[in-house]
């Protein structure tokens, strides 16, 4: 039977950079809600938008069975040149909306529960050789049962074989790691680990963690916190494309002490801060991998993460 016929399309939900999203439900079961994400496909396969839609479909198909990744029910094309992704309906908004909502209060236990779900999603992507490349709190959606789901795979791609360059123009600036800001074109899962740490810190601070107006300024914001990287701790860093503009004439800078982190992130605890700093190691080859992140004592130390039925949420 025609897959298009299995769903009934309803009202407009929202639009993003390259898609329009409608509510809908299964024809056979009107209580089973979906979101239909419509993306334009053009006949020119090199078109950026078309590639984004294609990637989102392809990677979601591979990853959708994980509990912390958005569920893809079906894919179909329609005669109006749209690729339609039928996603589960996620009615409770995203993590950015959640921390911005001052009527919602939450605890360090809640932060640990949310962080664990995000880190497991990222680990699963990397185990399957997929880089997400756009991890941010706005792309982490909340399901009806309060489980978090990583969404928006439009910028995802497979790990490349070593030697093959990739674009450094990915990841929203506030979440972008130093190697991409410096122009690296060879990178791996470590870019997502940095972004994930930004999301966790953001939950704890209830504000964007690293804020800037330009890419170069973002590097100095990072350097304010971690110091300026040196050839000693990051061999090759001064050979990266934007090194001279960013740090060429800057005097050395010391990283901020633990007391600074404690003051900014009172809801993380010292073990949480230790984890975040390891996830935000400037040198990507010394940064924790997603697999190592899950082995950190933060997860098993007290306090225990909140059970999902008790997590606060909006909408
Ligand atoms: P963006 O480009 O803003 O990241 P999308 O193109 O993925 O977002 O989606 C646009 C809007 O549609 C979102 O801001 C959200 O309000 C809504 N939306 C997207 N996916 C879902 C979903 N699975 N369930 C409910 N609403 C959704």
Image (cartoon, rainbow, N blue to C red):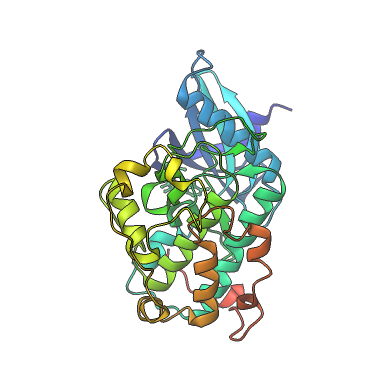
Eyeballing the image, is 232 above or below 131?
below
- Residue most extreme to the front: 232
Q: Is residue 249 left or right of residue 283?
A: left
Q: What is the total number of numbered labels drawn onto the structure image?
A: 0
The foreground one among 233 and 294 is 233
Query: Residue 160 sits in which quadrant?
Result: top right
Residue ID at (53%, 18%) = 79
Query: Residue 76 sits in which quadrant?
Result: top right
Percent from the top left, x then y, of residue 7? 61, 37
Percent from the top left, x then y, of residue 72? 64, 43
Residue ID at (63%, 83%) = 301
The foreground one among 107 and 308 is 107
Eyeballing the image, is 166 above or below 66?
above
The answer to whether residue 12 shows anywhere in this view is no
The foreground one among 39 and 194 is 194
Q: Quadrant of the N terminus?
A: top right
The answer to whether residue 276 shows anywhere in this view is yes
Eyeballing the image, is 24 above or below 92?
above
Percent from the top left, x then y, of residue 208? 35, 62
Percent from the top left, x then y, of residue 180? 45, 44
- Residue most extreme to the right: 1
Q: Quadrant of the C terminus?
A: bottom left
Residue ID at (68%, 53%) = 124
Ligand 1 image-quadrant field: top left
Q: Is residue 84 left or right of residue 199?
A: right
């Amino acid at each position: 039977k025609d897959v298009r016929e299995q769903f009934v399309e309803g009202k407009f939900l929202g639009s993003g950079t390259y898609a329009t999203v409608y509510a809908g439900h299964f024809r056979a079961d009107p209580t089973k809600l979906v979101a239909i994400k419509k993306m334009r496909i053009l006949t020119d396969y090199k078109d950026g938008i078309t590639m984004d839609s294609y990637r989102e479909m392809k990677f979601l198909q591979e990853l959708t069975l994980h509990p912390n990744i958005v569920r893809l029910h079906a894919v179909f094309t329609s005669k109006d040149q749209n690729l339609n992704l039928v996603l589960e309906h996620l009615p409770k908004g995203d993590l950015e909306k959640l921390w911005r909502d001052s009527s919602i209060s939450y605890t360090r236990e809640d932060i640990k529960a949310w962080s664990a779900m995000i880190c497991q999603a990222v680990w699963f992507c990397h185990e399957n050789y997929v880089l997400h490349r756009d991890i941010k709190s706005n792309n982490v959606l909340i399901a009806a049962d309060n489980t978090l789901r990583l969404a928006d795979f439009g910028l995802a791609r497979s790990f490349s074989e070593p030697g093959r360059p990739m674009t450094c123009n990915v990841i929203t600036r506030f979440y972008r790691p130093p190697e991409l800001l410096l122009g690296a074109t060879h990178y791996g899962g470590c870019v997502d680990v940095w972004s994930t740490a930004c999301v966790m810190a953001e939950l704890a601070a209830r504000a964007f963690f690293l804020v800037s107006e330009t890419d170069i300024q973002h590097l100095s914001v990072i350097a304010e916190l971690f110091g300026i990287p040196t050839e000693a701790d990051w061999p090759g860093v001064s050979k990266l494309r934007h090194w001279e503009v960013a740090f060429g004439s800057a005097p050395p800078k010391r990283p901020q002490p633990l007391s600074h982190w404690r003051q900014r992130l009172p809801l993380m605890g010292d073990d949480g801060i230790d984890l975040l700093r390891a996830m935000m190691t400037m040198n990507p080859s010394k940064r924790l991998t997603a697999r190592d992140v899950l082995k950190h004592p933060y997860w098993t130390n007290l306090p225990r993460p909140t059970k999902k039925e008790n997590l606060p949420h909006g909408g």
